[in-house]
Image (spheres, grey):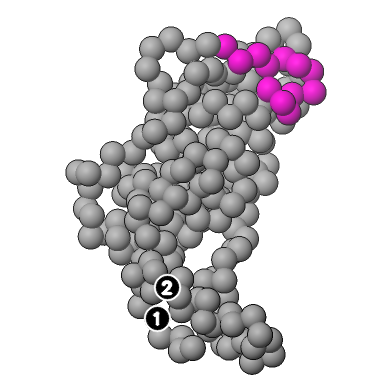
């Protein structure tokens, strides 16, 4: 569960519509209202990461205190557990495994968000609060989960998000064997096999 204490307030007398806040927001909580020629904040989507305030070159954004309970969480207890497990296994993650070192959001929460209708990394972020911290490594797992669930999000205009695999489990089998043959001292195949066994994944790579 992520507790959100603040949301961005925009001083329109200072805002120059550079849209840097829109570009940096991991939850797509800020957007330009072209008709009104002003930036708008969707408070329900905001995860209180405060990146927008840091990115604003005009100091037009101030974080304002929320009123009421604005906790973020995805309750997976009433979702299809078999489907959640299937999605997680496809990407080499245990359902209860934390996929974000900053928020400790789990793989099953990401999968649950997708099953509940999330279609983009921004949707997953807005529903779970993941990416509230560094927002880098967990993004890899967000893309993996979306892909495993058969969701192919379109690239968001102006977004800096991209899928860049970081895990040894992402390396193709043939390449893994080549690396293991060239550098046997690192025992790469052995490590991958142990990871898959620990996570309850089938391992057909061979050690």
- Relative height, residue 188 to residue 168 (above, below): below
Q: Residue at 57% of width from left, 75% of height from top?
A: 171
Q: Residue at 46% of width from left, 71% of height from top?
A: 195
- Relative height, residue 201 to residue 39 (above, below): below
Count of residue discs: 2
Q: Residue 196 has which mark? A: 2
- Relative height, residue 22 to residue 87 (above, below): above
Q: Which residue is mark 1?
A: 203
Q: Are marks 2 and 1 in contact (CB under 8 Å)?
A: yes
Q: Is residue 61 magenta?
A: yes
Residue 105 rendering spot, x and y as whole percentages: 44, 43
Q: Can residue 130 be seen in the rendering of this structure?
A: yes
- The residue range painted magenta reads 53-64
Q: Which is nearer the eye, 10 or 35?
A: 10
Q: Is residue 162 magenta?
A: no
Q: Quadrant of residue 78?
A: top left
How crowded pointer 1 is (Cα within 10 Å; few <14, some 14-19, many 20+) is rated as: few
Q: Residue at 38% of width from left, 74% of height from top?
A: 197
Q: Residue furthest right?
A: 57
Mark 2 or 1 closer to N-term?
2
Q: Can residue 131 be seen in the rendering of this structure?
A: no
Q: Residue furthest top?
A: 13
Q: Residue at 59% of width from left, 82% of height from top?
A: 187
Residue 34 rendering spot, x and y as whole percentages: 62, 24
How crowded pointer 2 is (Cα within 10 Å; few <14, some 14-19, many 20+) is rated as: some
- Image quadrant holding the N terminus, namely top left
- Relative height, residue 194 to residue 95 (above, below): below
Kindly report the distance in space between the C-alpha atoms of the residues bearing marks 2 and 1: 6 Å
Q: Is 175 left or right of 47, judged from the image as shown?
A: right
Looking at the rendered structure, the secondary structure element under dot 1 is loop
């Amino acid at each position: 569960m992520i507790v959100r204490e603040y949301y961005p307030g925009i001083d329109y007398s200072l805002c120059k519509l550079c849209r840097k806040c829109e570009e940096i927001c991991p939850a797509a909580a800020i957007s330009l209202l072209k008709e009104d020629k002003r930036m708008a904040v969707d408070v329900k989507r905001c995860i209180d990461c405060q990146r927008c305030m840091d990115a604003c070159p005009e100091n037009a954004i101030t974080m304002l205190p929320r009123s009421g309970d604005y906790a973020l969480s995805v309750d997976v207890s009433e979702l299809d557990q078999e489907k959640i497990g299937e999605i997680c296994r496809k990407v080499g993650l245990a359902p209860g495994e934390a996929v974000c070192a900053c928020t400790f959001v789990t793989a099953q929460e990401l999968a649950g968000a997708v099953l509940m209708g999330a279609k983009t990394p921004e949707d997953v972020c807005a529903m779970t609060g993941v990416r509230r911290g560094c927002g880098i490594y967990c993004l890899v797992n967000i893309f993996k989960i979306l892909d495993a669930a058969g969701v192919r999000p379109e690239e968001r205009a102006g977004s800096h998000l991209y899928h860049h695999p970081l895990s040894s489990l992402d390396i193709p089998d043939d390449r893994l064997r080549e690396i293991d043959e060239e550098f046997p001292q690192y025992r790469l195949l052995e490590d991958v096999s142990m990871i898959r066994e620990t996570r309850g994944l089938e391992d057909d790579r061979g050690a």
